Image (cartoon, grey):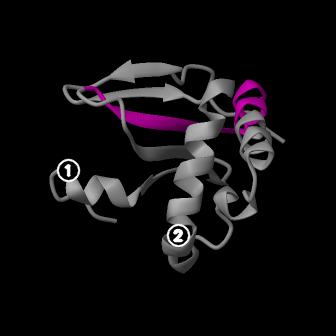
Amino acid sequence: MEKMIETIPTQFETQRLYVRAYQPDDAAMYYSMSLKNQAHLLRYETDNSIHTIHTLQDAERVIQAFRAAWQSRQSFFLGAFEKSSGDFVAQIYIGVVRWRTVRAGGDMVSLVSHHGGLTR
């Protein structure tokens, strides 16, 4: 299988967000977020990895899988965090749909809609 480009940054900032690759210590946050958003995302993304999370250990496994996919350049998962509060507000996925076609998508957690009207 081909690898994706080598130049995806592991972190960057916007005026209001800090965006970065997930780290092992994100597992507790990711676990909490997944429980809050599983029902919502089931409607749109039945294959989303949060549907496999039922324990903190499951979240740790998912974060490790994200990191392994990044290292192997197969796909890239980033978390977006609001600068002012540090709250997690979105997940950004960059991955291949068909080779030579890159799909970028994002999952907005329900919290985002309360911070300025972003919706899915």
Q: 49 left or right of 18? A: right
- In primary-sequence order, the first of circles 2 and 1 is 2
Q: Indicate the secondary structure of the residue bearing disc 1.
A: loop
For the question of whether residue 101 can be seen, the reply is no
Q: Position of residue 22 (x, y in %)?
A: 59, 30
The residue drawn where x is 66% and y is 33% is: 4
Q: Which residue is mark 2?
A: 41
Q: Position of residue 103 (x, y in %)?
A: 52, 52
Kind of residue at badge 2:
Leu
For the question of whether residue 21 can be seen, the reply is yes
Kind of residue at badge 1:
His
Q: What span is in magenta?
A: 66-83
The residue drawn where x is 78% and y is 29% is: 72
- Which image quadrant: the N terminus? top right
The residue drawn where x is 65% and y is 36% is: 27
Q: Which residue is mark 1?
A: 115
Q: Nearer the viewer, residue 94 or 118?
A: 118
